[in-house]
Amino acid sequence: MSTLTPGFQGRPRPQGVALPPGQYVEAGFPVLSAGPTPRVDTNTWRLDVVTESGDTRSWTWPDLMALPQDEPTVDIHCVTRWSKFGTTWRGVSLDTLLADVESTADFAMIGSYGGYTTNVPVAELLGGKAWVVHTFDGAPLHPVHGGPARLLVPGLYFWKSAKWVNRITLLPMDEQGFWERLGYHDLGDPWREQRYQGD
Amino acid sequence: MTEATVPGTGTDAGPRLGARYAMPSGWRVATLVDARAESRTARTLVLDVPDWPGHLAGQHLDLRLTAPDGYTAERSYSIASAASGTAPSVRVEITVQRVPGGEVSGYLTDAFAVGDAIEVRGPVGGWFVWSPVHDAGRPVLLAAGGSGVVPLVSMLRTRRDAGDRTPFRLVYSVRRPEDRLYVDELARRAEDGLEANVAFTRAAPLDARRAPGRLTLAELGAWGWPADIEPACFVCGPTGFVEAVSRTLVALGHDPACVKTERFGPAVD
């Protein structure tokens, strides 16, 4: 294979790591929640996808486990400015979950056990960008980190990766979720430092 | 991949999210097979992309540039060429506007040479699209700010290739005459029925019928379509342009749901 983009140099390299603006490297895994941690039994766990026409598709825990599993290794970036590199997860790609859902919606409202919501554009959920994950670092996902299953959208600030996810509602127009109504950014791209509304 | 699965060309190209947003997971190594200047500061790149899955007019692609030490930079560019189906080898065109101080655009306009290789991923984007299969007949307003004209030219080329006669109008805002892209081609598209108006915001040619300045509500009203015929509006350009034009269209009575926008800023280089 010939050399790719011969002569391209690029900007001066970041100091060792690909860190979004304003972030620092965190080795631990801080927990941030808006309320008490829900305890969710996998015997009753359900994930619903609701389209703009009201059609609903549901998955039980065995349904989720029976789907093809991905093992993404990704960097995550919290809006409180910590970033964690090379986190390893196991779960189901949203490309798999949503592939046959009939919808022209461009926005999604993610809902969780406990009432948490967050809005994410559909384009940020598909194309290998998002998963429903149940395993972190080789072990079942702890409830404080969103177990039994959470959304993982590593390309956006981590509040978009809703813990205890149980519902994806597809919407023709964007609506604001929990933190977004409180002044956080509707998209939340860490590389554009979209922390707050108006960023 | 079978022909029927190509977005926009198959008979079953419905609203399945998997089809609209599916993006090939891997990067393909494309080769620059031709290049031409579009203006003093913009260059069209003709890329031969192996196993291109096909694209709709209005979609974009991602490029990944690699430095000798392995450092990479990725950028998104709107596709300028007409919609295509899948093929073992497809020529995909983009037009790159050189951004002062840009990490990538200067390389692509000045250094990247015919025969060189680059990684390509895509197509990307399933909203800001026009297809003669799904959208024919409904009048279209294209509003472009600067190099935001690129995906709109893909729509015009797609209309031409399909022999489609959907009424199209173009409102094109540029700073100065020398900043215009696709000057000769846009003139030729008039033969296909395109009605185009150019607004110069900083400096106008001597024969211009308006003083330099931003697009006004009256101009958008006169150069676009009446809101009551419910045209499809596509607005692409820098955020400030897109904000102003889309707000004006809504003020003119257009349903916000009929106004599709695409924005770019200095951050996307």
Image (cartoon, grey):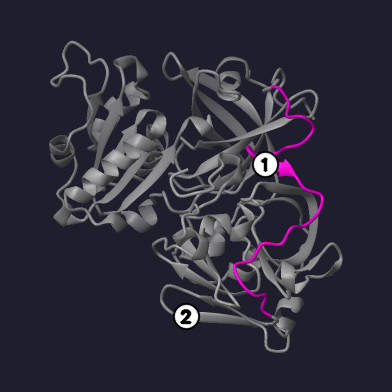
| Above or below, comparing residue B181 to residue A101 in the picture | above
**For the point 72% across and 20% down, which residue is it?**
A6
Dominant secondary structure of the residues highlighted in magenta in the image: loop
Q: In this view, does A131 lie to the left or right of B155?
A: right
In the rendered image, which residue does mark 1 sit on? A23
Image quarter for residue B202?
top left
Instruction: Residue under label 2, please give it.
Output: A55
Vertical relation: A106 (above or below) B122: below
Crowding around mark 2 (Cα neighbors within 10 Å: few <14, some 14 to 19, many 20+) is few
When the figure is inspected, residue A33 is found, relative to residue B204, above or below; the finding is below
* Residue B163 falls left or right of residue B269: left
Percent position (x, y) of residue A64?
71, 77
Q: Which numbered marker is on residue B165?
A: none
Which residues lie in the magenta part? Answer: A12-38
What amino acid does circle 1 point to?
Answer: Gln
| Residue positioned 66% across, 79% down in the render | A38
In the image, residue B26 sits, relative to residue A21, either above or below, namely below
Q: What chain does mark 1 sit on?
A: A
Q: Looking at the image, which is closer to me, A168 or B55?
A: A168
